[in-house]
Each structure stands twice: as structure tokens, then as C-alpha cells.
Amino acid sequence: MVEYKRAIVDHFKVSKNPDQQFSLNPFKVCKNITWLGYLQFFSAWFCWLMDAYDYFSVSLSVTGLGEYYGQDTTSVTTSMTLTLLLRSAGALISGLISDKFGRRNVLVATMTIIGALSLATAYAKTFPQFLAVRALYGIAMGAIFGPASSIGLESLPAEARGLFSGIFQQGYAVGYLIAAVVNLGFVPDMPEHIGYRGLFYLGAALSWAAGIIRLLIPESDTYKAAKERKKEQIEAGDYQQVSAKVYAKEIGKMVKNYWIQIVYCFWIMTLFNFFSHSSQDLYPKMMETAKCQTEHDATLATIISNVGAIVGGTIAGAVSQKIGRRFTMALFALLAGAFIPLWILPNDWSSLAAGAFFVQFGVQGAWGVIPVFLQEASPPAYRALFSGLTYQLGNMVSSASAQIEARGGEDRQIVDCHGEVVDDYATVSGIFVGIIAALIMITALAGKENLGKAIEKSKTAGEAGAGEQENDEVGPMATFDDREKGLKRVGTDSLYSTDKASITHKEHV
């Protein structure tokens, strides 16, 4: 009985690694980052920003696209569903390639393709052509997160990864913000024959710019070290060529050894994607129908909510370095839930905008921890594949979020400020977000984390033994007594290492 009590206490403990500095002071955190580290991070962040810009360019152009192709809103938004459904294919392809051969060239190729597809979106003549382009676009977009988050965070010192995880994730909010500002401030003044296409022209140019920047910056130190090891092994006559058969076998070992993390991270990413979609997708529609706001005011409120997202994600990422990833996720999910009434109950624009700010502060605050959480939970040699695929599989499952909310709103009617009967999207969205927030809190606190894991010190997927469990690890599912004895549990990431004299905390719980 005592053992189980100690195990429970140990489960919720965030231990301190004496070899790493943990501070909420951003200047102290950033002092050890090299210029190359900043450039690596910026190039990855820029690619992730363009993922959001290009995706939301369609949602902001629904009216113009519908008029051009003679389709209703539901038909046009089908392209967005296609994009979400096919992202997992891109994550699988880019993860397999980048974990073995490096991140840089994968991101360069991906951004080049995305730029071309942005132009193709603008020039698609028929609706079937438009859908085909957006389907291909979904595959390309799914290829960004895994390699970008991997190279962005592995190039930074461990004590800076929490803060920069939040900054990285909110590149998505910045991308949406830029698209919204361009759509609001510039698209209306463009010539009629350009119109909404201006968003896609700019998207193509910026995507290619992101690819060029990534091309000019060298590969990460992780892959430089792998090349050095290969060179040394060749000179010593010990090098073993990893064939496709062996590579597939190593992936099989990885799945066998890390299946608990795979299932857990897939589930938590499903919840997180529902969290963001349920709080964002129908928000402008809710503002216009249930709250009698103009399209312009709804767009302004959306911009304000994205400012809240950027602030929340950045703060949460830094906080997670001090109190742990899972506690931060639970705390900010609770914060989002607390502001749901302010988000849906008022009728005046100012209160609704304030509610949107704080709900997204909480939602995207919790999201800000995700990039580094997934990197630390991943099998060391397969971080791009693991993080990208679990993220996008969760995205795929949650792709029906808008349809679920829309159907719920249609089944619940209210009288708006003009005395007209309209769909009650506000109540349905509030209930949905509240349920997901509660599930995230439970899931985060029930799980484990590897705070401060040395993700940069790992084999690459192209090396023999990449799928094996690290030999000096004790799994987080081990009991307290197991850890004291230094016993290993295969199948989970380690938190502790041992020597003859003492137990040394290697990573954080």
C-alpha cells in the first residue's frame, strides 16, 4: 500500500535537473542560444506560419470562392475538410524521409510545392480542379509540423525549449492573423479580377521565401553528428549500411517499444485539435448570426482572439519549463473553461471580444506546450515522424468538429436581437469547448512527461539500432522502488539513470 502511495506522489512530482537552468526570465533563458540556433528556429517558425496562412486563406475567401465557382458555403468548405483528412499522409511521408536524411531539404521541397499549389488555387478554373488542388495541398501542409518543430527545438538549449515551443506553436496564430489583416485591409481594394486571389498570390511568394531561407541555413547539429559518426565508422571499417528492410524492421521495433506513447499522444492530440476547432471554426458565424455583429466586427474580434492566442501560447510555453508540461496544459485548459460564459453570453461587441481573447489565451496557452511535449515524448530517432503523425492524425479525427457544432446549432434555436429565429451556435460551442477542456485536464494529469529530455543527443532513423529503447532509461510507468533500484521498463521513455552510488535525475517528471 505504501508503495502505491509513493508511486502516486511520484507521478505528480516535477523533479529538478541540476544540470539544467530553469527560469521564467526570457533574457536569462536566451543567453545561451547561438545565432545559428535563432536562425534554425526562425526558419522553422516561418514555415509553420505559412501553413496557417495558406490554410486560412480559403476560410477567409469562402464568399469569393463560392461566387466564382457557383457553389454554396458547405461545398466550398469541403475543400478544408479534404485538407485536414489528407494531412496525415504528408506527415507520414515527410517524417520517414526527414528522420533518416535530415529536415532541411524536406522543408525546402515542401515549401516549394506549397507555393506552387497556392498559385494553382488562384488559377483553378473549375470547382473539381479547385478540390483536387486543395487535396494535394493537404498532403503538403501535413509535411510541415514534424520536421519544422524538430529542427526548431533540437537546435536550442533545453532550458529555452519551453518558451520557444510556445512561440513556435503561435506561429500558427500569427499566420492566421496576417491572412485576416490582408483580407480585411487589402483584398477589398484590389482590382475585381484579382479579388480573393490576392491572398493566394501573397501566400505563394511568402511560401517560396520560407523555402529559400530554409535552404540557406545548414542542417541541424543532430544530423551533422550522424554524418560524423558514419564517417568514423567507415574509416574504422565498422559501418553497416541500413537497407530498406532493416529500416522497416527498426520502425517495427520503435512501434513495439513505444506503443504506449503513440496511443497516448494520438488521444491527447485528438482532444487538442477538437479544442482549437471547437473554439475557432464557427466563432465568426456565431458572432454574425446569434450576436447580430457585422462581418467586419466579427473579423476584428477574431483578430483580437488571435492576439490572445499569441500571448497565451508564449507565456504558457515559458511557464511549462518551470512547473512541467502537463500541469501547464491542465492549468490553461481550466482558464479557457472559466471564460466560456464571457465568450458566449454577452451581446455587445466589447464583451464578446474580451471573452474571445481570454478563451484563446487559455486554448492556445495549452497548445503552446504541445511542440516540446511531443518532442520529449517521441522515440529519439523518430521525432519528426512521431510528432507530425500524432498531430495530424488528431487533426484528421477532429475534422468533423465544425459539422458537429453546426448540426448541434441547427437543432437548438434562439431568437436573435432582431427577433428572428436563428441557430444557437453559441451554446453548442460553449458546451463543446467545456467538455474538451475537462477531458484535456484529466488526460494531461494522468499522463507522464520527459521535461528537459536531451532530444538533440540521439541517433537518426538511418542508423542501426534506431528503434531500440535507450539502454540507460527507467520508464515512467515503473514503480518508485523500481527507480530506486535502477531497473528498466521497456516500452516507455525514461526519466532516471543510475550509477553505483546514487540515483541521478536525468530528466524531469
Image (cartoon, helix red, strand yellow):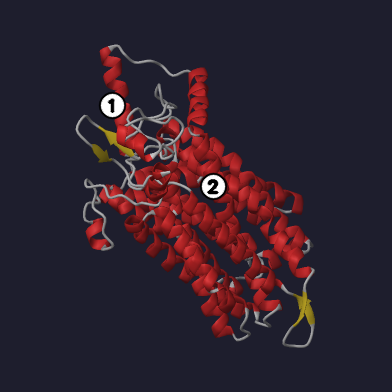
Residue at the far front in the pictured view? 1
In x, y percent, where is residue 405? Answer: 70, 64
Q: Element at badge 1?
A: helix
- Provide the residue designation for mark 1: 228
- Name the amino acid type tagged 2: Tyr
Q: Which mark is residue 196?
A: none
In the visual, does 504 lie left or right of 278? left
Q: Element at badge 2?
A: helix
In x, y percent, where is residue 77? Answer: 70, 59
Q: Nearer the viewer, residue 393 or 257?
A: 257
Q: Quadrant of the N terminus?
A: top left
Vertical arrangement, residue 432 with respect to residue 140, above or below: below
Point 50% across, 46% down: residue: 144
Q: Nearer the viewer, residue 60 or 154?
A: 154
Is residue 171 visible to the viewer in this orientation of the structure? no
Work out whether mark 2 precedes mark 1 in sequence or the reverse, and give the earlier one: 1
In x, y percent, where is residue 483? Answer: 34, 36
- Provide the residue designation for mark 2: 391
Q: CA distance from mark 2 to mark 1?
A: 31 Å
In x, y percent, where is residue 167? Answer: 39, 59
In the visual, does 371 lie left or right of 452? right
Label 1 environment density (alpha carbons within 10 Å; few <14, some 14–19, many ≥20): few
Point 57% across, 69% down: residue: 183
Point 45% across, 42% down: residue: 147
- Name the amino acid type tagged 1: Glu
